[in-house]
Image (cartoon, grey):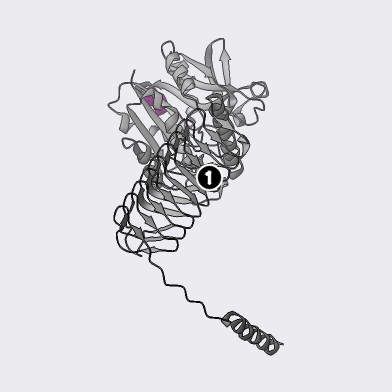
């Protein structure tokens, strides 16, 4: 059966106290909306409809960045969840399959749970995702009669007996799309809030002779985010789960609670991660690498056996080949470092290619930006770049070439050549003492004048 997603993402999220739409606040480097979309990717949805309201343009851009086929529809008035789902009706007019209603601020529904809901559709017309709550609080309650779900009751409309139920409603629903919209069309707003509740479709379905049931999941999957504190809680839940999965896959973490991962971080087995490492989005680390303490990686690829850090920063476009070394206080951006090359100390390598086995001395800088354009630096195989070399791009240093320490390279260096470009040293006998005396007198007079 084909699947369509209807993701409700129209809320402003006033408790977030932000101009950013609530669903665009990030967990592990991705908007919550993207997490909701990712949860259903294993189902290979034929259509994804995002119901947006506040900040619709930004919400649509985030959805399209993850899935360019996603379609955004507007809910100009927030009149309840059933009203929100109804906005997707026209977009799915010709769709003949099941629809799953998800929420853009509920990022942790698992693929296995959604698959279980789809499987349950073989025997029932409407599937509602429920969970047994440790503290049911103000959640809506699922009223079951055996395996049949008879109704969903919102807390404010529930009796004392119904409030005693611990099986709660997540809001996630699966049904044939045409059936879902027929049921939504029949929903009224005769309730304490005057809203059109999506939950009312269960009783309407029963009245129409349709069957409904509940599939349950762990309460942690249904965590909704409505405040900054809950956002931090969601991020912490993600981090704990992701770290555990990595360690179970063969990755060593010396202090796992200090390592920050992104939603798409990939790390291969036998990699060692030291304390206080941050992985931004789009990072791949292959088997057997070592990421040393206090390093920050984003948008980069680290190959087998490479050593990064401590205190290194790898920025987007960085490609480290096998057995490379990037050491302390080194920043690399949009650069390829070939096998066996070393950039060990206090250097910036940007918009560059460093050949195999090249050694980049401490304090080397590729001067890649002229204030308007970025320019490329080419460093050849087995070359030796002396400490404190400035490479003014565009420029190249040939294979087996060398630069003297303190050199400013402004023109290409041929293979096997030595480049030296620095002012000759001049020693002035006794001048240091005289100069210090002059400076001390100036300081004294300045201090005396201030008094």
Q: Nearer the viewer, residue 198 or 310?
A: 310
Residue under pointer 1: 309
What x and y, as percent, mark residue 111?
Answer: 46, 24
The number of numbered badges drawn on the structure is 1
Where's the C terminus, which quadrant?
bottom right
Which residues, given as a range, are shown in magenta? 180-190
Residue 310 to residue 286: above or below: below
Where's the N terminus, which quadrant?
top left
Q: Identify which residue is drawn at 51% across, 46% down.
A: 296
**Is residue 188 a member of the stretch shown in magenta?**
yes
Left or right side of 233 for 120: left
Residue 436 to residue 414: above or below: below
Residue most toward the left?
94
Q: Identify which residue is drawn at 52% across, 17% down.
A: 214
Q: Nearer the viewer, residue 294 or 420?
A: 420
**Is residue 393 a member of the stretch shown in magenta?**
no
């Amino acid at each position: 059966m084909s699947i369509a997603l209807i993701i409700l993402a129209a809320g402003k999220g006033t408790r977030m106290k932000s101009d950013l739409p609530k669903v665009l606040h990030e967990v592990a480097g991705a908007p919550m909306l993207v997490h909701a979309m990712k949860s259903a990717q294993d189902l290979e949805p034929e259509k994804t409809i995002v119901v947006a309201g506040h900040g619709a343009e930004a919400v649509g851009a985030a959805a399209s960045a993850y899935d360019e086929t996603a379609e955004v529809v507007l809910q100009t008035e927030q009149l309840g969840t059933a009203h929100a789902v109804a906005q997707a009706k026209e977009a799915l007019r010709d769709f003949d399959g099941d629809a799953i209603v998800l929420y853009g601020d509920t990022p942790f529904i698992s693929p296995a749970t959604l698959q279980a809901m789809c499987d349950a559709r073989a025997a029932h017309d409407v599937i509602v995702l429920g969970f047994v709550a440790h503290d049911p609080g103000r959640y809506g309650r699922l009223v079951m009669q055996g395996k049949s779900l008879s109704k969903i009751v919102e807390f404010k409309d529930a009796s004392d007996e119904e409030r005693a139920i611990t099986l709660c409603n997540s809001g996630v629903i699966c049904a044939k799309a045409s059936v879902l919209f027929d049921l939504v069309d029949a929903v009224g707003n005769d309730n304490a809030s005057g809203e059109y509740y999506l939950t009312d479709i269960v009783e309407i379905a029963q009245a129409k002779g349709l069957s409904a049931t509940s599939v349950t999941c762990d309460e942690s999957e249904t965590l909704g985010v409505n405040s900054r504190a809950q956002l931090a809680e969601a991020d912490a839940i993600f981090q704990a789960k992701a770290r555990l999965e990595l360690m179970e896959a063969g990755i060593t973490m010396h202090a796992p609670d200090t390592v920050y991962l992104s939603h798409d971080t990939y790390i291969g087995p036998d990699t060692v991660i030291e304390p206080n490492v941050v992985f931004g989005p789009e990072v791949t680390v292959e088997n057997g690498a070592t990421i040393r303490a206090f390093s920050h990686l984003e948008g980069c690829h680290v190959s087998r056996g490479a050593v990064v850090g401590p205190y290194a920063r790898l920025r987007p476009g960085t490609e480290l080949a096998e057995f490379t070394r990037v050491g302390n206080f080194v920043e690399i951006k949009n650069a390829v470092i070939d096998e066996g090359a070393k950039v060990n100390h206090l250097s910036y390598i940007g918009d560059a290619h460093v050949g195999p086995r090249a050694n980049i001395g401490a304090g080397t800088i590729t001067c890649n930006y002229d204030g308007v354009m970025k320019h490329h630096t080419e460093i050849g195989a087995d070359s030796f770049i002396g400490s404190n070399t400035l490479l003014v791009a565009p420029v190249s240093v040939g294979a087996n070439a060398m630069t003297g320490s303190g050199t400013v390279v402004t023109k290409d260096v041929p293979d096997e050549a030595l480049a030296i470009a620095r002012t000759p040293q001049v020693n002035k006998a006794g001048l240091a003492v005289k100069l210090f005396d002059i400076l001390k007198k100036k300081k004294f007079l300045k201090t005396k004048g201030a008094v």
